[in-house]
Every structure is written in C-alpha cells, then in structure tokens.
Amino acid sequence: MKSLAFVIPIYNEAENIASLLDRLLSVADRLERLFALQVRLVFIDDGSADDSYDILKAQEFGGRPAQIVQFSRNFGKEAALSAGLEAAADADAVILMDADLQHPPEAALDFVTGWLEEGYDSVYSYKDQRRKSEGALRALMSWLFYRTINHGARFVIPRDAGDFRLLTQPVCHALLAMPENQRFMKGLYGWVGFRQKAIPFTPEPRMAGTSSFRPAQLFAMTLDALTSFTIAPLRFMALFGLIIACLSTLYGIFIVVERLLVGGNPAGIASVLTLISFFGGMQMLALGLLGEYVGKGVLEAKNRPSFIIRDRVTINADGAATGA
Ligand code: UDP
Ligand code: MG
C-alpha cells in the first residue's frame, strides 16, 4: 500500500481550517478508495498569530495519521514547505497545497493519476486563468523575470507554475538534499529535474483572510529569487559595460578625427550631464546588484537553519497523539 502525505503551510488560517478539512478529507476518502492509498496530513504552523495551531491539534482528520509542526516564529512559506517535506520524507509521495483553498484539493486526483497511472515523478499545476486580469506592467515584469531566470539554464522554470504539486519520494529527497537555506522552491523543483507533468488549474479566490504577500514583498521576493538562482543579471551588466566601453572608444576616435579634420568642439554641457547621470545610475544599479549577490553569500556562509521548531504533535491512525 502506497502512502501519500498532504503538506500544508499554515499562517493565520484559523478561519479556513474547517472548510479546508471538509474538502480535503472527502478527497482523501476518494484517493483511498480509488487508488488504495494511505493518506496522511502534515501541517506546518508558520508562527501564526491566531489560534491555528490549537485548532489543528483538536482535529480528528477522520482517523488518519497527521503531523502538526509549529515554528518558533514566522519563517515564511518556503521554510514551512521545507519543514513539511522533511516531516513527510518517508511517504511515497507528497502533495504541497495552500490552506486558503485557492488550490482546489480535488486536483489531487489528477496529480495521483499522473503519478500512479502515467508514471511521472512529479506533477505540477499551472494557472490557466487568462492573464487579462493583470496589468500590462505586471505581465511585462513577469515575462522579464522568467526570461532572466531561465537564461542559459539547462532546465526551465515554467511560468505560472506554483507550489501546488505532487512530488514522489525521490524528488522530495533530492529537494531535501539541497544544502542552501535561502530556498526558492519554484526554482528548485525545476533544478532537480525528473519526469514532470503539468496540469492546468484555475485558482479559486481566497476563502477568508487576506494574502500575506504585498507588492513590496513581492518585489523583494522576485529579486531574491533571481539572485539566488541565476547570475544572469551580472552577465547582462558585464555585457552592457563591454558594449558601452566599445562604443565610447569608437566615439573618442571619432571626436579626435573630427577635431583634426573639421575643427570645432563636440556638443555642449547638456549631453555631458545626461551621460554622467545615466552612467552614475547604471553604476549604482550594478553595485547594488553585486551587493545582493555578496549578501546572499554572507547569509549562506552563516549557515543558520531555515526554521526552528517550537512544538510538534504526531497523531496516529488510532487517534492517539504524541508530542515530541
Ligand atoms: N503562508 C505561510 N507563511 C507565510 C505566508 C503564507 O506558511 O509567511 C502560507 C499560507 O497560510 C497559505 C500559503 O502559504 O497556506 C499561501 O499564502 P497566501 O494565500 O497568503 O499567499 P498567495 O495565495 O497570495 O500566494
Ligand atoms: Mg492564497
């Protein structure tokens, strides 16, 4: 009998837990009947300020085994996912899923079909909603992001794919073996490779509460993801510098030749000011970018854990709870 673990990060989701379990447990029923799977649940409370953890501990999960882990503070969703993978490392497959029901639990049936019947190592979902709803600027940024991060790589990080996915044990172990603690999960899924299948899904609106990610945070995360995954921006900067250096050499020669043949002085102060401020800006940008990478190195060198566990409860199939 194969086992499947649902890994669900929880951050201030008290209002969503009841409806989540409602739908999740009926999906679990169907998975057990259709695929003879043994389903268990893993929840990571990422330092919630509400009583999510106590609510989870009081659940029965329809007699299924469950693990509930509580972080000592908020460490972020990526850390929660890593902790979840660790807790579920002995399951034959895991499904990563948000707690706010934006990821429809019913899609798990398609994931498992891809795994057990079609032999894929990992099945991921991508948003199929038409992108009209988002602004042109956001679409452009997103395009630029994926172009940059996939530049020259031997693997592709698919656009619109999220964390909602099934990973079999080998994939899960490969991810856990990654030594870095600044984790950009979406990138790592692609990096580890394996046979992957994509399934479209339409994200539902958030059940209750608000998304924890604000635009400023999104910008920070984007920069973070980019610099922790690729050095393409540094290459672009170097290439840009090279091109500018060549052009200015040519222009310098042109000025000298013009002066000797025609006489007169090159154009005035306005163009000089523009060029100085433009290249001043470019240099700051390049320096900032470089600093981003150096900072990453410092953070990794400190080798701090990506999360700290304050408390954990394991609920066995017979409903008995053991703390650890
Ligand atoms: N989450 C988390 N830690 C955080 C922020 C979010 O574990 O610091 C969880 C959250 O409880 C949810 C999932 O990550 O299960 C997605 O979060 P959210 O819905 O806020 O993000 P969005 O859907 O906007 O990407
Ligand atoms: Mg959400």
Image (spheres, rainbow, N blue to C red):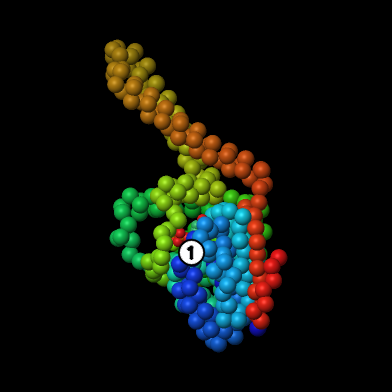
Q: Which one is nearer the viewer's eye here, 79 or 111? A: 79
Q: Which one is nearer the viewer's eye here, 262 or 203? A: 203
Q: Which one is nearer the viewer's eye here, 259 or 306? A: 306
On the rendered structure, is 240 left or right of 5? left
Asked if 24 appears above or below 142 in the picture, the reply is: below
- Which residue: 54% across, 36% down? 291
- Which residue: 41% across, 67% down? 207
On the rendered structure, is 205 left or right of 77? left
Residue 280, quarter of the rendered image = top left
Visible residue check, residue 300: yes
Visible residue check, residue 77: no
Direction bottom: furthest residue: 33
Q: Secondary structure at mark 1?
A: loop
On the rendered structure, is 263 left or right of 56? left
Coordinates of residue 59 in the picture (x, y in percent) = 56, 74
- Which residue: 37% across, 26% down? 277
Badge 1 density bin: few <14, some 14–19, many ≥20, Cα 10 Å: many
Coordinates of residue 297 in the picture (x, y in percent) = 61, 42
Instruction: Classify the position of the C terminus by image quarter.
Output: bottom right
Instruction: Classify the position of the N terminus by image quarter.
Output: bottom right
Coordinates of residue 74 in the picture (x, y in percent) = 55, 54
- Which residue: 37% across, 16% down? 256
The amino acid on which the numbered mark 1 sits, given as a three-letter code, is: Glu
Confirm or reject: label 1 Cβ below 8 Å from ligand 1: yes
Q: Which one is nearer the viewer's eye here, 197 or 54? A: 54
Image quadrant, ligand 2: bottom left
Asked if 120 appears above or below 228 in the picture, the reply is: below
On the rendered structure, is 80 left or right of 246? right
The residue to which callout 1 is attached is 13
